[in-house]
Image (cartoon, rainbow, N blue to C red):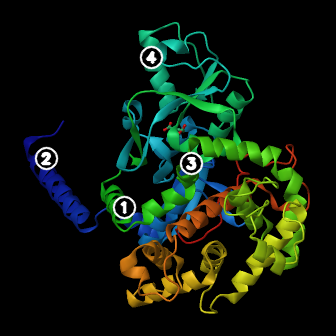
Amino acid sequence: MFSQSDFRPRCAKWLIATGLFLMLSACVDKPTTLERVKEDGVLRVVTRNSPATYFQDRNGETGFEYELVKRFAEDLGVELKIETSDNMDELFDEMQKPGGPVLAAAGLIDTENRRKQVRFSRPYLDVTPQVIYRNGQSRPTDANDLVGKRIMVLKGSSHAEQLAALKLKNPAIEYEESDAVEVVDLLRMVDEGQIDLTLVDSNELAMNQVYFPNVRVAFDLGEGRQQRWAVALGEDNSLLNEINSFLDKVQKNGTLQRLKDRYYGHVDVLGYVGAYTFAQHLQERLPKYEKYFQTSAKKEQVDWRLLAAIGYQESLWQPSVTSKTGVRGLMMLTQNTAQAMGVTNRLDAKQSIQGGAKYFAYVKDQLDDKIKEPDRTWFALASYNIGSGHLEDARKLADNEGLDPNKWLDVKKMLPRLSQKKWYSKTRYGYARGGEPVSFVANIRRYYDILTWVTQPQLEGSQIAESNLHVPGVNKVKPPEESPPL
Ligand code: GLU
């Protein structure tokens, strides 16, 4: 028991000690999360290992989320350290661990449940949850049609939450949540008929549509949503604020759009039907001509997949087509070009490919030395399509406008002017359908992207047979190679 006299000095000491402690803590502030990241020089990020997020290809790490978060780490001036979690639950568990990753960049939708565990950034990608079914089966059109179907979704995903909410209203809906699969597996299972339906975000479907010709969108389940990054709940705002201003910046300066185009642009350019048709032709037609593309590519020192992409753009890999203007064959050569390249029969696929390859190599060689790769390839394609004279005119127009005549991004803006009198009257070669080479190059680049994606380097010497076709699986899918935005 304290006596009154004991108590006073003790109390005073106590008060002094507490005061000192408070003063000290004010002087030595705990570093904020952002300060910690900068001090450590490392940004630890957790993600999912999937084509739409992060994976390894022969050139190293890649993926939409990876590319975006890498730029963020660069902005902070720190090293990026990626960790992958096997499933959604593990991902959110990791975020709770002290000393764990400070940021999740994993194509995440913000849901009510998740908001109890993490805080979300501003959005960077608009998506729609879509119910996916197999072509040929009866198409579900609304949530009631989910009853009686074998449905599988990712465990702990936003889609599992959506289904749980639906099941509350309609208990007859049954579905399985799996923590052993990724989105590509779900799509493959629908494609192969192992399950009836799955639910994925539209960006995941766009990414994978060309590999799964049988999968189709049944209907959009609910409103559009947005993918966001997440930080731990206790985070002191410093990192979240920094993330938000970074996302705002990349939105405004076009970086975000370029990444979206690169990763999700295939379906936009090809269209839904085009992507589907391409996937079919890839399996049915290309195997017949692949070896010709490879031999000619070797001889002319070009990538065979680029030649194959040109062939697809020209004739959809059909050797006997003839256009109204008299161009013919798989590579659609004119009579003059064919003659100049030593082609005697344009309808012979092998000769046509050889001629096209030789002509492409010739056209590329004629280009101004100042045009460097990868732009050089796009210029060569444009020249192949519209002729070197018109291309030169467009380069001059670019120069006059203060643009760079050696950059495809600049010259492609000028090409459509060649069909407007105001502009072509001042050029040397006059009128041309200048919009054509722009879409010609854009299409070929998309086909080329997909072909580089589906062909594995170790298979290049072999025929693309259905069994060799590289349908992406986790870890395996290859992205379009780095090249400037079109
Ligand atoms: N975006 C989903 C989610 O937040 C996961 C994967 C998907 O897009 O299908 O749970």
Q: Nearer the viewer, mark 4 or mark 2?
A: 4
Is tag 1's residue or tag 2's residue first in the polypeptide sequence?
2
- Identify which amino acid the numbered label 3 is placed on: Val
Q: CA distance from mark 1 to mark 3?
A: 21 Å
| Residue 251 horizontal side relative to residue 445, left or right | left
Helix, strand or loop under label 4: helix
Q: CA distance from mark 4 to mark 1?
A: 34 Å
Tell which of 346 and 270 is nearer to you.
346
| Residue annotated with mark 3 | 267
| Image spot of residue 199 (x, y percent) | 55, 29
| Residue annotated with mark 1 | 251
| Residue annotated with mark 2 | 6
- Identify which amino acid the numbered label 1 is placed on: Gln
Tell which of 153 and 407 is nearer to you.
407
Name which residue lies at 39% across and 81% down: 423
Using a 10 Å C-alpha cutoff, classify the residue at mark 4 as few (fewer than 14 neighbours), some (14 to 19) or many (20 or more).
Answer: some
Q: Nearer the viewer, mark 3 or mark 4?
A: 3
| Image spot of residue 485 (x, y percent) | 52, 68
Tell which of 106 and 463 is nearer to you.
463
| Residue annotated with mark 4 | 166
Disc 1 + disc 3, Cβ < 8 Å: no
Decide: is 191 above or below 63.
above
